[in-house]
């Protein structure tokens, strides 16, 4: 069965842009995936950090069934619907204080496009600042604010103009060759120079991920965003926080920005919002949200009632099962175990993360920090053979990403660590 699907995909799907894992997934429950040949895998990637409440959570499944029997589509930007309204109210309650008005879309990239439009419309300014090493989507607009050359292809440009980049809080590879905390968080203070020397001081907003996912699970210092917000406020610019990957309990808080004591002006969500159903949201202050006028923005499928019903049930599951707290507790355990592993395995250069959003950066040499790209891919391959699915990535393409469903059982986490360490050991022996 697997070989049949693989051959048909090769013939009928556009897959030249990616290398898919050679497994055919047909089922999932909790933190386990099952392939077409009956083999099970511990899923420590969660559909790219999407199924935070696990695969097929019962409350979500039942909510989707009920809604699908009632209404599947109606056009939420043509008519009103109580399910969509209820979700907007719920998001205002769980989001940082002051964020109350939501626009629904389908993907994280669409949410970020909405945020850019809102910021420009409200401030009447045209420029955007983003972070180096960042990732905000794969549309032309969101690639324009993505600070990674390996994501931007020269034959897909030109990209949007009036975008500048400031330093990422990448402490392991500090662009200023300093060490925290003696650096005085220079990466944050750099924003002032970027605005003064790289823009026309006409900046509508800065957009940033509170934990940088595709960049390699880069975790900023505690005071990083407070310093950025102070500079932005002085220039009359807004702060957009991209919670598409880090939101919905992933880092041990409902939203990752809560770790930093800063309230954004606009926040985007996606991935974990609806347990795997296509939905995204851009939530803003009331005055910012009200700045759009008829014709400025729309989405045919945004606010689909089935996806919104899934999101409501998902949020209830989070509250009842205290999933963010689970993520915080299990994340501490995971980081502790990986730090212990680092002492025994020279291939591990850095371990970092918050909650169950954890990155392990692999290097050929700890002194030079030369990226171990081939070794990273090999570890991922061996882990899959051992029944463990992990992600890889980062701006240096050498970070293994542990982002399992947040409800993963501790025995599953222990087994995942066992397989991962075994894969590391084998790769280190192969390289010896």
Image (cartoon, rainbow, N blue to C red):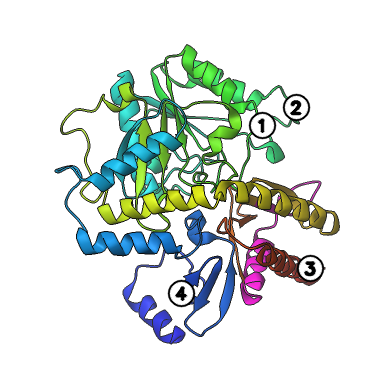
Q: Earlier in the sequence, mark 3 or mark 1?
A: 1
Q: Residue at x 40, y 59 (%)?
A: 60
Secondary structure beneath disc 3?
A: helix
Q: Range of the magenta residues?
A: 359-387
Q: Earlier in the sequence, mark 3 or mark 4?
A: 4
Nearest to viewer (mark 2 / mark 4): 4
Residue 190 visible (yes or no): no
Taking the magenta stretch, the answer to whether it contains residue 386 is yes
What residue is shown with label 4?
27
Q: Earlier in the sequence, mark 1 or mark 4?
A: 4
Check the image and report above or below for 163 versus 42: above
Nearest to viewer (mark 1 / mark 4): 4
Secondary structure beneath disc 1?
A: loop
Check the image and report above or below for 47 versus 361: below
The answer to whether 262 appears left or right of 104 in the picture is: right
Residue found at the very far front of the displayed protein: 320
Q: Disc 1 vs disc 4: Cβ atoms closer than 8 Å?
A: no
Who is closer to the viewer here, 349 or 42? 42
Q: Quadrant of residue 228?
A: top right
What numbered label is drawn on residue 181?
Answer: 2
What residue is shown with label 3?
425
What numbered label is drawn on residue 221?
Answer: 1
Q: Crowding near pointer 2: few (<14 within 10 Å), some, many (20+)?
A: few
């Amino acid at each position: 069965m697997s070989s049949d699907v693989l051959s048909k995909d090769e013939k009928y799907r556009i897959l030249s842009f990616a290398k898919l894992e050679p497994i055919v997934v047909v089922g999932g429950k909790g933190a386990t995936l099952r392939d077409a040949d009956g083999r099970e895998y511990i899923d420590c990637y969660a559909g790219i950090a999407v199924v935070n409440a696990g695969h097929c959570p019962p409350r979500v499944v039942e909510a989707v069934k009920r809604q699908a029997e009632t209404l599947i589509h109606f056009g939420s930007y043509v008519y009103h619907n109580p399910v969509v309204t209820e979700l907007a109210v719920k998001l205002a309650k769980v989001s940082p204080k002051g964020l109350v008005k939501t626009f629904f879309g389908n993907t994280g990239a669409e949410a970020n496009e909405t945020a850019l439009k809102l910021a420009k419309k409200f401030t009447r300014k045209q420029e955007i600042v983003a972070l180096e090493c960042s990732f905000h989507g794969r549309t032309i607009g969101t690639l324009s604010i993505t600070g990674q050359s390996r994501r931007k292809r020269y034959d897909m440009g030109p990209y949007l103009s009036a975008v500048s980049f400031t330093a990422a809080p990448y402490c392991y590879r500090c662009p200023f060759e300093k060490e925290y905390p003696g650096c005085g968080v220079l990466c944050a203070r750099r924003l002032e120079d970027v605005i003064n020397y790289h823009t026309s001081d006409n900046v509508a907003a800065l957009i940033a991920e509170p934990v940088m996912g595709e960049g390699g699970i880069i975790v900023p210092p505690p005071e990083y965003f407070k310093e950025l917000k102070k500079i932005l406020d002085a220039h009359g610019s807004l702060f957009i926080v991209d919670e598409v990957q880090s939101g919905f309990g992933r880092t041990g808080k409902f939203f990752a920005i809560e770790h930093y004591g800063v309230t954004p002006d606009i926040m985007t969500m996606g991935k974990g919002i609806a347990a795997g159903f296509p939905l995204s949201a851009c939530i803003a202050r009331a005055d910012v949200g009200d700045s759009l006028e008829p014709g400025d923005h729309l989405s045919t499928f945004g606010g689909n009632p089935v996806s919104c019903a899934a999101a409501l049930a998902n949020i209830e599951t989070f509250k009842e099962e205290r999933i963010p707290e689970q993520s915080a507790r299990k994340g501490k355990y995971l980081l502790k175990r990986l730090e212990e592993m680092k002492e025994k395995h020279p291939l591990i250069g850095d371990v970092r993360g918050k909650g169950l959003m954890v990155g392990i950066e692999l290097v050929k040499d700890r002194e030079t920090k030369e990226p171990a790209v081939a070794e990273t891919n090999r570890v991922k391959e061996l882990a899959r053979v051992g029944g463990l699915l992990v992600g890889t990535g980062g701006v240096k393409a050498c970070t293994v990403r542990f982002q399992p469903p947040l409800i993963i059982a501790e025995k599953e986490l222990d087994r995942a660590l066992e397989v991962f360490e075994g894969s590391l050991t084998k790769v280190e022996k192969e390289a010896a």
